[in-house]
């Protein structure tokens, strides 16, 4: 997505979204931060998404400018719930993580022979059990 396309979406959301009746909050319902939820209406979700889109549009600028390292997010608006447990105040952009190439596993001879060895061990075990039972039967009778 180009910067112009992103800006068009941001402008459109700003025009269509009303801050008057919007509600948004992040709440912790359990014992830890992993037990959190968002309580929001449609307008509140749009406004929060709008803030994230604005931060997204500024990300490259902030990464390239070493003097700045955060993008502030509006967090003291009427549409943000005062009772919210978590308030996000800024975004700290990072450069894209480099994904390491996974080393391909080379199959060795042992890997190829191992299944046959297991089958052979089971066959030998089965033969030994049959011979043992046959010997036991001959010994008793």
Image (spheres, rainbow, N blue to C red):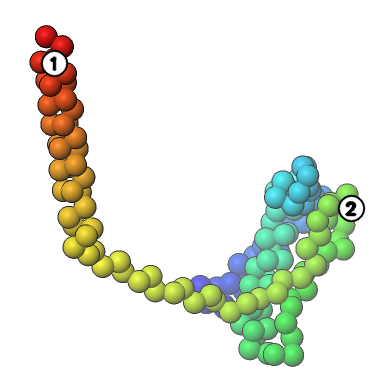
Question: Residue drawn at (15%, 37%), measured in percent from left and top?
Answer: 124
Give the image location of residue 117, x and y in percent: 18, 48
Q: Earlier in the sequence, mark 1 or mark 2?
A: 2
Which corner quadrant of the image does residue 4 belong to?
bottom right
Q: How many marks?
A: 2
Question: Residue drawn at (35%, 71%), measured in percent from left and top?
Answer: 103
Q: Nearer the viewer, residue 43 or 73?
A: 73
Residue 43 in view in this figure: no
Q: Is residue 86 left or right of residue 69?
A: right
Question: Does residue 132 lie above or below 91 as drawn?
Answer: above
What residue did someone put label 2 on?
82
Give the image location of residue 77, x and y in percent: 86, 61
> Which quadrant would the C terminus be assigned to in this image?
top left
State the separation of the CA atoms marked 1 and 2. Answer: 88 Å
Question: Does residue 20 lie above or below 135 as drawn?
Answer: below
Give the image location of residue 46, x and y in percent: 69, 56
Q: Is residue 115 left or right of residue 53?
A: left
Q: Is residue 96 left or right of residue 37?
A: left
What residue did someone put label 1 on?
139
Give the image location of residue 45, x and y in percent: 70, 53
Label ID, residue 64: none
Question: Residue drawn at (88%, 49%), measured in percent from left and top?
Answer: 83
Question: Residue drawn at (65%, 68%), measured in percent from left and top?
Answer: 53
Disc 2, SS:
loop
Disc 1, SS:
helix
Which corner quadrant of the image does residue 64 belong to?
bottom right
Residue 48 in view in this figure: yes
Q: Nearer the viewer, residue 66 or 102?
A: 102
Crowding around mark 2 (Cα neighbors within 10 Å: few <14, some 14 to 19, many 20+) is few
**Cβ atoms under marks 1 and 2 closer than 8 Å:** no
Q: Nearer the viewer, residue 26 or 10?
A: 26
Mark 1 vs mark 2, foreground winner is 1
């Amino acid at each position: 997505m180009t910067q112009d396309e992103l800006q068009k979406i941001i402008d459109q959301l700003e025009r269509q979204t009303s801050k008057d009746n919007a509600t948004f909050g992040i709440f912790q319902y359990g014992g830890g931060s992993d037990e959190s939820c968002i309580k929001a209406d449609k307008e509140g979700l749009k406004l929060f998404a709008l803030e994230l889109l604005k931060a997204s549009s500024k990300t490259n600028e902030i990464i390239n400018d070493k003097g700045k390292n955060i993008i502030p997010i509006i967090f003291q608006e009427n549409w943000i719930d005062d009772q919210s447990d978590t308030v996000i105040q800024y975004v700290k952009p990072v450069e894209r993580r480099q994904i390491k190439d996974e080393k391909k596993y080379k199959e060795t001879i042992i890997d190829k022979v191992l299944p046959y060895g297991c089958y052979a061990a089971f066959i030998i075990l089965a033969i030994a059990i049959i011979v043992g039972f046959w010997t036991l039967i001959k010994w008793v009778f």
